[in-house]
Image (spheres, rainbow, N blue to C red):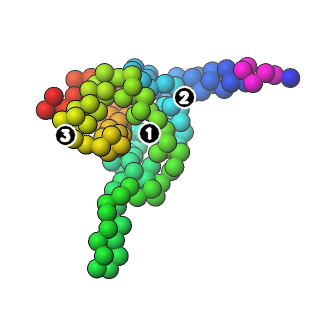
Amino acid sequence: MISPQLKLEKVEKEATDALKKITFANKILSIKGITEITLGGILGEAGDLSKFAHGNSLLRHAGLNLAEASSGKWKGQIVISKRGRSRLRRYLFLTTMSLVANNPEFKELHAYNVKVKKMKKMKSIMKLIGKLARILVGIARNNEPYCPDKVQSLAA
């Protein structure tokens, strides 16, 4: 009987081998904070990122686009639609949390959003998920390497 540890190592090796076949995967993996497992999850749920016209269409596919909850005369709040792939939402969220923890550019942007712009932490994370989606689609479409200078906010 194969131990669970060996099964896990075998699956991780297969995932890494599959990522090596994707042209833009190494460029995305060069971003500090993105691992093979999270990228594999995003690609598994979203498919080919170069087919998306813009990062916003990836967000729409994940159900992270904004929608207004209102009816008749009653005007509701603007919320996330959640009409999309829940696992893709989860992988984008976990990847962004990893980026905020490990990537200096995303860490600085999150601190700027929270301290200077007085945003709530979760709203800042959602904004950074949008930035991540645009970066992923941009790298996949243009086949350019990750450039940390483009990530920085203009005000910082």
Residue positioned 19% across, 40% down in the render: 117
Binning the other alpha carbons within 10 Å of mark 1 as few (below 14), some (14 to 19) or many (20 upward) gives some
Residue 150 image point, x, y percent: 22, 28
Disc nearer the start of the sequence (2/3): 2
Residue positioned 22% across, 41% down in the render: 118
Looking at the picture, which amino acid does disc 1 mark? Phe
Question: Which residue position is annotated with label 2?
Answer: 37
* Residue 127 in sight from this viewpoint: no
Looking at the picture, which amino acid does disc 3 mark? Lys
Binning the other alpha carbons within 10 Å of mark 2 as few (below 14), some (14 to 19) or many (20 upward) gives some
Question: Which residue position is annotated with label 1?
Answer: 93
**In the depicted view, which residue is nearer to us: 28 or 2?**
2
Disc nearer the start of the sequence (1/2): 2
Residue 105 image point, x, y percent: 28, 25
Looking at the picture, which amino acid does disc 2 mark? Ile
Q: CA distance from mark 1 to mark 2?
A: 14 Å
Q: Is residue 101 magenta?
A: no
Total labels drawn: 3
Q: CA distance from mark 2 to mark 3?
A: 33 Å
Main SS class of the magenta portion in the image? helix
Residue 99 image point, x, y percent: 38, 28
Quadrant of image for the C terminus? top left
Circle on res. 17: none
Q: Residue 31, relative to residue 69: is it above or below?
A: above
Residue 54 image point, x, y percent: 32, 45
Binning the other alpha carbons within 10 Å of mark 3 as few (below 14), some (14 to 19) or many (20 upward) gives few
Magenta residues, start to end: 2-6
Question: Which residue position is annotated with label 3?
Answer: 117
Q: Secondary structure at mark 2?
A: helix
Residue positioned 36% across, 43% down in the render: 122
